[in-house]
Amino acid sequence: MTEQIPAEEPKALAASVQAVGVAFAVLEQLANSDVPVGTSELARRLQQTKARVHRHLVTLRELGFV
């Protein structure tokens, strides 16, 4: 018997994976920069909204990564 996956689950998983990708992209930009980089500059480099980058930075700070 094959278990059925609800239609919402793949969308949630895709959003989670995408969020992890953005978080790692933020960390990569910070790690590869010789100078401090602000939220606006990170958003520009990553082609993301400032709000989204800010949310990731807040979470990464709370976890002790930035």
Image: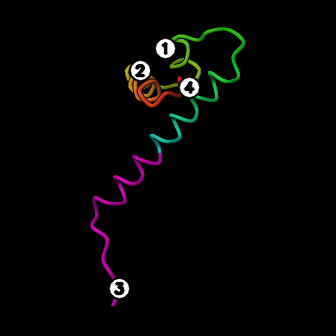
Distance, label 1 to label 4, CA atoms, is 10 Å
Residue, disc 2: 54
Distance, label 3 to label 2, CA atoms, is 41 Å
Please give left or right for residue 6 compared with residue 42 in the image: left
Mark 1: amino acid: Thr
Residue 56 quadrant: top left
Mark 3 neighbour class, 10 Å CA radius: few under 14, some 14 to 19, many 20 or more: few
Which region of the structure is painted magenta?
A: 1-17
Distance, label 4 to label 3, CA atoms, is 40 Å
Residue 39 vs 25, above or below: the answer is above
Is there a contact, CB below 8 Å, between mark 1 and mark 2? yes
Residue 23 or 48: which is nearer the viewer?
A: 23
Residue 50, position as x, y percentages in the image:
42, 18
Residue 64 vs 40, above or below: the answer is below
Label 4: state its secondary structure.
helix
Residue, disc 4: 46
First in sequence, mark 4 or 3: give its number: 3
Instruction: Look at discs 1 and 4 and give the one toward the viewer.
Output: 1
Instruction: Look at discs 2 and 4 and give the one toward the viewer.
Output: 2
Residue, disc 3: 2
Mark 1 neighbour class, 10 Å CA radius: few under 14, some 14 to 19, many 20 or more: some
